[in-house]
Amino acid sequence: MGVTYCSTCDAPLFADLDVAVAGGGNSALVAVIDLMKVARKVYMVSLTPLTGDEILQDKVMSSPKVEVFTEYKILRIVGESAVEAIEIESLNTGEARRLSVAGIVVEIGLLPNSKAVIDTLETNRIGEIVIDSRCRTGVAGVFACGDVTDVPFKQVIVAAGEGAKAALSAYDYIINQR
Ligand SMILES: Cc1cc2nc3c(=O)[nH]c(=O)nc-3n(C[C@H](O)[C@H](O)[C@H](O)COP(=O)(O)OP(=O)(O)OC[C@H]3O[C@@H](n4cnc5c(N)ncnc54)[C@H](O)[C@@H]3O)c2cc1C
């Protein structure tokens, strides 16, 4: 219906269409770079000034296809059966605008569901479980894998591969116990 959380997966759906990206960090900038290769126009809407890496910002800013709105709030996504537009509002002036788009990619961060282990296992500043290359957590006999860990690229094939690694590591751990 036009709302997506993954430009890697869904950018081709917006070939020759106008599309928006919500966010101002590295994930949002990468989404814009993915989309500007296929879309007709890409709007980037961020609550804050852009916070992503300068090299990514430079690539985005140099594209004539991209229009960036910083310090704008997205009020709503408009559409009957699919996305038709988004409404945005300037945090500084209160000016409201309606941007006609066929889709929106939401890149405003992810919250790992690590609450159950937050006191037991080491987690990083955003709550992802820290693992080594064998999916070990630092607590003997406890392994972790997938999106909840600090492994980059939150994709099915990555999570499945990490799952296989964690299972093999667990097996290795067990057979080495007396
Ligand atoms: C909207 C959306 C679209 C996506 N599209 C794509 C795509 O097109 N291609 C792609 O490669 N990736 C896509 N992804 C990413 C992909 O879904 C994830 O990378 C993948 O599912 C991660 O697998 P996982 O097993 O680590 O976590 P999950 O699939 O999230 O599985 C975690 C499981 O743990 C369970 N759980 C959580 N807490 C507890 C608990 N305390 N006790 C017991 N069980 C618990 C949950 O219920 C869930 O079943 C998409 C993600 C989203 C959100």
Image: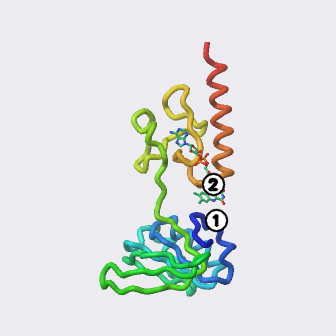
Residue at point 61%, 67% (across, down): 7
Camera-side residue of 109 and 62: 109
Question: Of the numbered discs in the image, which one, if any, rests on residue 155?
Answer: 2
The N terminus lies in quadrant? bottom right
- Please tell me whether mark 2 sits on a helix, a strand or a loop: loop
Q: Residue at x 49, y 29 (%)?
A: 139
In x, y percent, where is residue 100? 54, 85
Under mark 1, the amino acid is: Thr
Q: Quadrant of the C terminus?
A: top right
Disc assigned to residue 8: 1
Label 1 beta carbon within 8 A of ligand 1: yes
* Residue drawn 59% across the image and 40% down it: 133
Residue 135 higher or lower than 78, as above or below: above
Camera-nearest residue between 2 and 164: 2
Q: Residue 109: percent from the left, percent from the top?
A: 47, 60
**Residue 131, horizontal then vertical, whole percent:** 53, 39
CB-based contact (under 8 Å), mark 1 and mark 2: yes
Please indicate whether residue 28 sits to the left or right of residue 157 in the image: left
User: Is the distance from the Cβ of mark 2 to the nearest ligand 1 atom less than 8 Å?
Assistant: yes
Q: Secondary structure at mark 1?
A: helix
The mark nearer the N terminus, 1 or 2, is: 1
Q: Quadrant of residue 90?
A: bottom left
